[in-house]
Image (cartoon, grey):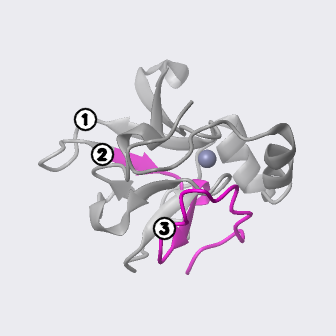
Amino acid sequence: MGRSASGYDLSPLTADARAAAEATLTPDERRVILHQGTERPFCGGLLKNKEAGVYVCRLCGLPLFRSGSKFESGTGWPSFTTPYDPAHVAEVVDDSHGMVRTEIRCARCDGHLGHVFPDGPAPSGLRYCLNSVSLAFRTEPPPPGAGPSLAPATGPA
Ligand SMILES: [Zn+2]
């Protein structure tokens, strides 16, 4: 795979880079990111974060959402109206739990992020519903050539 419009390399991680990144995950992060889990609502460390910056993939560091598209959805999970770059967020049909939903994953590392629903605010009309543990907060986007971020486990409280 090539580069996204915003300049990021979307090639899959090498096996070594993936193993190194996965080794930094906590058990909760592992359950959500690698096994499509869901964190409990109103618990996520990034739910109430209002700082200006960029939300990147916890596993590989790809920028996924900007703080400017974050909104208070009332659901208890961090919610966004638009991705940083549409090519960075992959959509997968999820028919588990007796519902048909659209799962969202990181386009580079395939890590589970959450779901997208068609009931968001204008103008996109979309609600990207995220697990805090799938994200890491950065005040600046990482340089496009950056590899896995090996991010610390938690963002700002
Ligand atoms: Zn990723």
The residue singled out by tag 1 in the image is 118
Span highlighted in magenta in the image: 128-157
Q: Nearer the viewer, mark 2 or mark 3?
A: 3
Of helix, strand and loop, which one carries label 3? loop
Is residue 132 found inside the magenta-colored segment of the image?
Answer: yes
The earlier-in-sequence mark between 2 and 3 is: 2
**Observer able to see residue 103:** yes
Cα distance, mark 2 to mark 3? 22 Å
Task: Say what amino acid the circle numbered 1 marks.
Answer: Pro
Q: Quadrant of residue 48?
A: bottom left
Task: Say what amino acid the circle numbered 3 marks.
Answer: Pro
Is residue 147 found inside the magenta-colored segment of the image?
Answer: yes
The residue singled out by tag 2 in the image is 127
Q: Residues within 10 Å of mark 1 (few under 14, many from 20)?
A: few
Q: Quadrant of the N terminus?
A: top right
Of helix, strand and loop, which one carries label 1? loop
Residue under the point 37% across and 53% down: 84
Cα distance, mark 3 to mark 1? 27 Å
Q: Position of residue 61 (x, y in %)?
A: 61, 57
The residue singled out by tag 3 in the image is 141
Asked whether disc 2 touches disc 3, contact meaning CB atoms under 8 Å apart, the reply is no
Residue under the point 70% across and 56% down: 148
Cα distance, mark 1 to mark 2? 6 Å
Foreground of the two, 134 or 41: 134
The earlier-in-sequence mark between 3 and 1 is: 1
Asked whether disc 1 touches disc 2, contact meaning CB atoms under 8 Å apart, the reply is yes
Please say if 90 is above or below 111: above
Q: Is residue 57 left or right of residue 126?
A: right
Task: Say what amino acid the circle numbered 2 marks.
Answer: Arg
